[in-house]
Amino acid sequence: MKINGTPYRSVWRDAHDPELVHIFDQTKLPWTLDILALRDEAQVAHAIRSMQVRGAPLIGAVAAYGLAFALQKDASDKGLTEAAAMLVETRPTAINLRWAIERMVAHLSPLSPDSRVAAAYAEADAICDEDVQVNESIGRHGLELFRTLWEKRRPGQERLNILTHCNAGWIATVDWGTALAPIYMAHDAGLPVHVWVDETRPRNQGALLTAWELGAHGVPHTLLADNAGGHLMQHGEVDLVIVGTDRVTRQGDVANKIGTYLKALAAQDNDVPFWVALPSSTIDWRVTDGVKEIPIEERSGEEVTYVHGLDEQGQAARLRVTPKGTKAANPAFDVTPARLVSGLLTERGRCDATAEGLATLFPDLAG
Ligand code: MRU
């Protein structure tokens, strides 16, 4: 995607030093476009934990480069195993992280140690390139869905109102995004899409990142307080909800940013379609019941008791929004049971959020 006319991916290798990888520091967006250089696995682990990089597909891609960095110091079997274990533990909920590391290990283990470093960079590059293609496919399939909805519009309806939660845009992937890919394509194709952007407390990925992405691409959008979506649905102001996901179980349960479940409940109560966009790397075929089996990341309560922003002088500021000493809980994700999901949008097309639906679309992966 473009920033001020220049095309970027969310992670890329340095043109002059290919053992250097660049990312945007997403803790600084949208105020500052700070490009960081990563050159060792500890920096990668820090970037993932501190959410300088975030979004399920992107953390997997960046972690893959982290493994390549680690192998430069120690390409032995022990070095590979230890670095893989360290990187997998940086965030617990998004399965793409484990998927990327397991793919790297499976590719590298059979090789001799002296050929592992070059092979690791090449495989990490392949993960990135495939992510872009996969998201582009999700976008194309989603565009068909949006066109169908638009054909069924009410007389006089002027725009297709889409609600999204968190950030599942190009900055959460290598490019395009998952839930936002069809929105970009629909906008580019001339469909009059308008996006309701949930602010997504406590870290405000919607207010900060989704609003920034959509604004940069010229997609009409309006920011909402997190609790406003249900009210808009009751008044016919939402035609479709579409979100990304951090992990989908084999029966179609969906883990995503905290608050997604409440949107799905409101959508069902108001007959609003609730779609989830995902690459197949987000499906965890080893788990079935998402509520019971998906580990939910618990982050610092300070993310809830403080807000970040710019002061009147444009300086970055951190403000406490509670009485001193207030304790806060901060589960970062929730699970939306499959029964509340209208459908899954993948790189191979759409399917029901059921074990049968997923197995039919991915017979080679379902096992
Ligand atoms: O905590 P984050 O910002 O990494 O959470 C991101 C999300 O919940 C996204 O919706 C999800 O990763 C899908 S990204 C294409």
Image: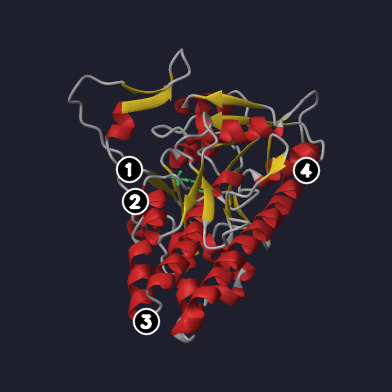
Three-letter code, disc 1: Pro
Task: Provide the residue designation for mark 1.
Answer: 331
Coordinates of residue 90 in the picture (x, y in percent): 35, 56
Task: Provide the residue designation for mark 2.
Answer: 296
Q: Please report contact status of discs 3 and 1: CB closer than 8 Å, yes or no.
A: no
Task: Provide the residue designation for mark 3.
Answer: 77
Q: Is residue 283 left or right of residue 322?
A: right
Q: Which mark's residue is nearer the viewer, 2 or 3?
A: 3
Three-letter code, disc 4: Arg
Query: Relative to 43, is 150 above or below?
Result: above
Whole-number angstrom distance, CA of label 3 to CA of label 4? 51 Å
For marks 1 and 2, the one nearer the N-term is 2
For marks 3 and 4, the one nearer the N-term is 3
Query: Relative to 256, is 133 above or below?
Result: below
Three-letter code, disc 2: Ile
Q: Please report contact status of discs 2 and 4: CB closer than 8 Å, yes or no.
A: no
Residue located at (61% from left, 46% from top): 170
Q: Which mark's residue is nearer the viewer, 4 or 1?
A: 1
Q: Secondary structure at mark 2?
A: loop
Q: Which mark's residue is nearer the viewer, 2 or 4?
A: 2
Q: Secondary structure at mark 3?
A: helix
Q: Is mark 3 within 8 Å of ligand 1?
A: no
Q: Is residue 150 left or right of residue 162?
A: right
Coordinates of residue 25 in the picture (x, y in percent): 48, 42
Residue located at (43% from left, 38% from top): 259
Q: Please report contact status of discs 1 and 2: CB closer than 8 Å, yes or no.
A: yes
Whole-number angstrom distance, CA of label 4 to CA of label 1? 36 Å
Whole-number angstrom distance, CA of label 2 to CA of label 4? 35 Å
Three-letter code, disc 3: Asp
Q: Which mark is residue 147?
A: 4
Q: Please report contact status of discs 2 and 3: CB closer than 8 Å, yes or no.
A: no
